[in-house]
Amino acid sequence: MRSEIINDYKINAFENKKHFLNQIKNEKKILIAMNAEKILKDDEKLRKIVNENISYPDGIGAVMALKQKGLNTIKIPGSEFWLDIIKEFQNEKSFYFIGSTQEVIENTIRKLKIEYPSINILGYQNGFINEEQKSELKEKLQNLKPDVIFVAQGSPRQEFLMDELIHLQPALYMGLGGSFDIYGGNKKRAPKVFLDLHLEWLYRLLKEPTRIGRQLNLVKFLVLLKLGKL
């Protein structure tokens, strides 16, 4: 697995999705999506988790930074890749799902069972977890021992939870942000034309103007990248 250090975060490069799937087949680590916003975070706890696990370029900023360092890579949207994992390993691995609201997670599970009839789902849990529920979740995971655990809570909350869980129940973990809301809820991904032009960030901004602060991080990132300060 080839990687580079960008702002003290280790980010891995992948030639294609199949390459990524082959790399993680037998791993028991956390898959972490990296974009401009996350790379700019000055958070030592998050940085440690990223560098101990398997990060991948989920945003165009991460792709540009890796290419500037001489590594050829594709952009791997986490909102798509978790379904690639299910498709690839549905007949050989077991799955557990954590995240979103009860309605969305139930819709997600229902839809998965229709689209992937052979999937082995050991259980699921919404993302609103208090300390008592977290203890119950830990016990449940230790008993069930799923091979793959998806956690959709938003960053860095999901990374902190996965780091806590993996030490009790080793498995392949993946943080998914709002992916369940897209798959099992009413949230829509950007149209293909925006995706093809690497303008998903613009579509999100047009749909949710309150994201302007987050998108300014991309501008800041590109300036720092141009100046060679990453």
Image: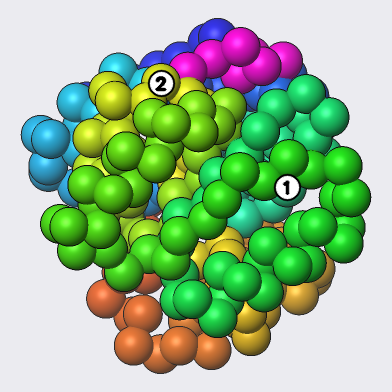
Q: Position of residue 21 (x, y in %)?
A: 71, 23
Tag count in the figure? 2
Element type at mark 2: loop
For the question of whether residue 221 can be seen, the reply is: no
Element type at mark 1: helix
Separation of residues labelled 2 and 1 (CA atoms): 21 Å
Highlighted range, magenta: 22-28
Q: Where 178 falls versus 226 (above or below)?
A: below
Q: Where 220 falls versus 92 (above or below)?
A: below
Return the mark for residue 186.
none
Q: Position of residue 85 (x, y in %)?
A: 71, 36
Q: Residue at x 47, y 18 (%)?
A: 28
Q: Where 93 falls versus 110 (above or below)?
A: above
Q: Quadrant of residue 142?
A: top left
Residue 8 appears left or right of 82: left
Residue 159 appears left or right of 130: right
At label 1, the amino acid type is: Leu
At label 2, the amino acid type is: Pro
The residue pinned by badge 1 equals 83
Q: Position of residue 118 (x, y in %)?
A: 87, 42
Which badge, 2 or 1, comes first in the chain's sequence? 1
Nearer the observer, 219 or 169: 169
For the question of whether residue 135 can be seen, the reply is: yes
Residue 10 appears left or right of 206: left
Return the mark for residue 170.
2
